Image (cartoon, rainbow, N blue to C red):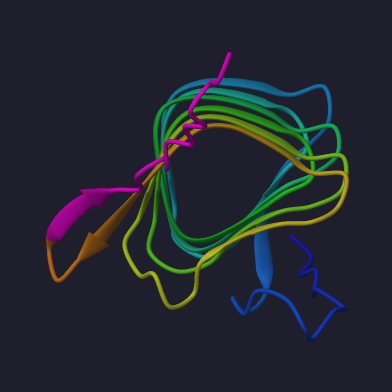
């Protein structure tokens, strides 16, 4: 199988993409990826990626739980995501669900045209903290 390399140097590091789930392919079950991978088809179930995972524009992931070191989304991802490093939602990408960021330093990046719907939780030193939504209250006067 061939090796694909990401051309952009200003985004997620993760090395070579060595696995591909192509457009038109449907995978259901537990998926364990040892190296960099790209999903252009549909995956339903539990995913563990020990390196960079790219969900391409035609990729559709329905995750019971998705664990990845780094994740770049150009397609659709739904479910619970646990990301060890950086999560990028690219233009045209959509993420819906609950995200647990294990390292706040790397962070969550939503590019213009990317969509995120859900909640984010940050794990600090093993303890998890849910990002608080500030309440804005304006006193009404009559």
Residue at 79% across, 52% down: 90
Residue at 77% across, 84% down: 10
Percent across and percent down for residue 82 are: 37, 48
**Looking at the picture, does residue 95 appear above or below residue 74?**
above
Residue at 59% across, 76% down: 14
Percent across and percent down for residue 121 are: 33, 47
- In the image as oriented, which residue stretches furthest toward the front? 142
Residues 27 and 135: in front is 135
**Looking at the picture, does residue 19 appear above or below residue 13?**
above
The reply to whether residue 10 is visible in this rendering is yes
Most common secondary structure along the magenta stretch: loop
Residues 18 and 7: in front is 7
Left or right, residue 85 beside residue 52: left
The quadrant in which residue 71 appears is bottom right
Which part of the image, by quadrant, shows the C terminus? top right
| Magenta stretch holds residue 45 | no
Percent across and percent down for residue 11 are: 73, 76
Residue at 18% across, 52% down: 128
Left or right, residue 61 beside residue 68: right
The reply to whether residue 31 is visible in this rendering is no
What are the residue bounds of the magenta stretch?
127-142
- In the image as oriented, which residue stretches furthest toward the top? 142
- In the image as oriented, which residue stretches furthest toward the bottom? 9
Percent across and percent down for residue 106 are: 49, 75
Residues 60 and 81: in front is 81
**Looking at the picture, does residue 59 appear above or below residue 17?**
above
């Amino acid at each position: 199988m061939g090796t694909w390399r990401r051309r952009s140097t200003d985004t997620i590091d993760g090395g070579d993409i060595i696995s591909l789930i192509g457009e038109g392919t449907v995978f259901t079950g537990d998926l364990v990826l040892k190296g960099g991978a790209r999903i252009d088809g549909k995956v339903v179930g539990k995913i563990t990626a020990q390196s960079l995972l790219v969900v391409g524009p035609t990729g559709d992931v329905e995750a019971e739980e998705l664990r990845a070191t780094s994740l770049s989304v150009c397609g659709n991802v739904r479910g619970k995501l646990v990301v060890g490093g950086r999560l990028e939602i690219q233009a045209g990408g959509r993420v819906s669900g609950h995200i647990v960021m294990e390292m706040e330093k790397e962070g969550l990046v939503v590019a213009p045209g990317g969509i995120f719907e859900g909640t984010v939780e940050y794990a600090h030193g093993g303890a998890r903290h849910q990002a608080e939504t500030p309440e804005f209250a304006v006193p009404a006067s009559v």
